[in-house]
Image (cartoon, grey):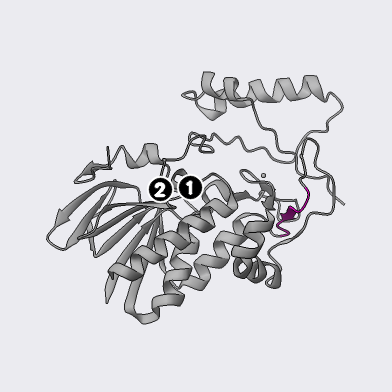
């Protein structure tokens, strides 16, 4: 039985784990690590301390399926719709340029519910707060080191975290050449984010709240506030010529996947997971 590590419990990693389980069943032991305290990645959903309050998606707000992807990824959309995790967007979104033939969806239980669904279906051994720091070749296996705790051995590794994090890894990794009122989510601009990127969120939060009060002075006091910093956001330019993944090494197998290797949206992650599955099936 091959032991496969998937680094990153976001959409690409969770779907890849789910598809791998369905395709190879008992031929693989699937392990998923994420350095965060929960799953979701850039499809994370935050829930306030008061359970009666509304949740908010911090990253992706809705999903747009083009006619082509509605057809090629029909099984994924059909599964999520049948499970009640997706539903058609029935209201208008300010600034959304809707194109003829596209279908927009929202998640009644939050974007993270999609990731949690695929992780549950995968039967993977899921571990949080496991921050990978290095990968080292040990014969036909990979020794994976983490920031805290002992290293572990795997037959194959799939890395789905942002490329800047991949490039920070040590070892033998050499890549080629968002009753009670609603929740309110505030996104800052790119220039503001770049200016304050290295500051603590507790220092930046008052600045954002002051600007919000200037724009909406009648806004009532919130029940709870969470300030979240996205160090790695959407990919502007994907790696050219990559069909959803990049195979760094064939023996032992090391694959990089995620939106950086196709394009940065829901279907891009689905495409990357499907592409990675084909590589894993051919190698394991």
Q: Quadrant of residue 23?
A: bottom left
Left or right: 136 in relation to 73: left
Q: Secondary structure at mark 2?
A: loop
Q: Nearer the viewer, residue 56 or 171?
A: 171
Q: Quadrant of residue 264?
A: top right
Label at residue 262: 1
Q: Nearer the viewer, residue 69 or 25?
A: 69
Q: Position of residue 60 (x, y in %)?
A: 63, 46
Q: Nearer the viewer, residue 90 or 203?
A: 90
Q: Is residue 163 visible?
A: yes
Against 69, residue 62 (above or below) is above
Q: Secondary structure at mark 1?
A: loop
Q: Quadrant of the N terminus?
A: bottom left
Rendered residue at 47%/55% (across/down)? 272
Q: Position of residue 16 (x, y in %)?
A: 45, 63
For the residues labelled 2 and 1, the Cα–Cα distance comes to 7 Å
Q: Position of residue 202 (x, y in %)?
A: 56, 28
Q: Given contact means CB atoms under 8 Å apart, are the residues at marks 2 and 1 in contact?
A: yes
Magenta residues span 100-108
Q: Which residue is mark 2?
A: 242
Left or right: 173 in relation to 97: left
Q: Badge 2: few (under 14), some or many (20 or more) residues near its Cα, within 10 Å?
A: some
């Amino acid at each position: 039985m091959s032991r496969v590590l998937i680094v990153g419990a976001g959409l690409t990693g969770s779907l890849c784990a789910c598809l791998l389980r369905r395709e190879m069943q008992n031929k693989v032991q699937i392990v998923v690590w994420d350095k965060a305290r929960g799953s979701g990645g850039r499809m994370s959903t935050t829930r306030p301390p008061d359970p009666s309050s509304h949740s908010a998606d911090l990253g992706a707000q809705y999903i747009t399926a083009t006619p082509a992807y509605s057809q090629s990824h029909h099984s994924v959309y059909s599964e999520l719709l049948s499970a009640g995790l997706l539903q058609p967007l029935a209201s208008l979104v300010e600034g959304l340029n809707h194109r003829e033939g596209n279908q927009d969806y929202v998640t009644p239980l939050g974007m993270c519910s999609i990731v949690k669904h695929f992780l549950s279906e995968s039967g993977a051994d899921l571990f949080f707060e496991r921050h990978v720091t290095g990968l080292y070749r040990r014969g036909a296996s990979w020794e994976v080191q983490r920031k805290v705790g002992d290293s572990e051995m795997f037959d194959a590794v799939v890395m789905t975290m942002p490329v800047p994090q991949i490039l920070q890894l040590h070892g033998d990794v050499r890549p080629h050449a968002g009753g009670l009122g609603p929740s309110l989510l505030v996104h800052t601009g790119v220039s503001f984010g770049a200016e304050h990127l290295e500051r603590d969120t507790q220092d930046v939060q008052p600045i954002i709240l002051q600007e919000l009060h200037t724009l909406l002075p009648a806004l009532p006091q919130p029940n709870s506030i969470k300030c979240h910093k996205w160090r790695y956001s959407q990919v502007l330019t994907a790696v050219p010529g990559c069909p959803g993944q990049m195979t760094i090494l064939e023996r032992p197998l090391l694959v990089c996947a995620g939106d950086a290797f196709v394009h940065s949206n829901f279907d891009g992650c689905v495409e990357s997971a499907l592409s990675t599955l084909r590589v894993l099936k051919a190698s394991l």
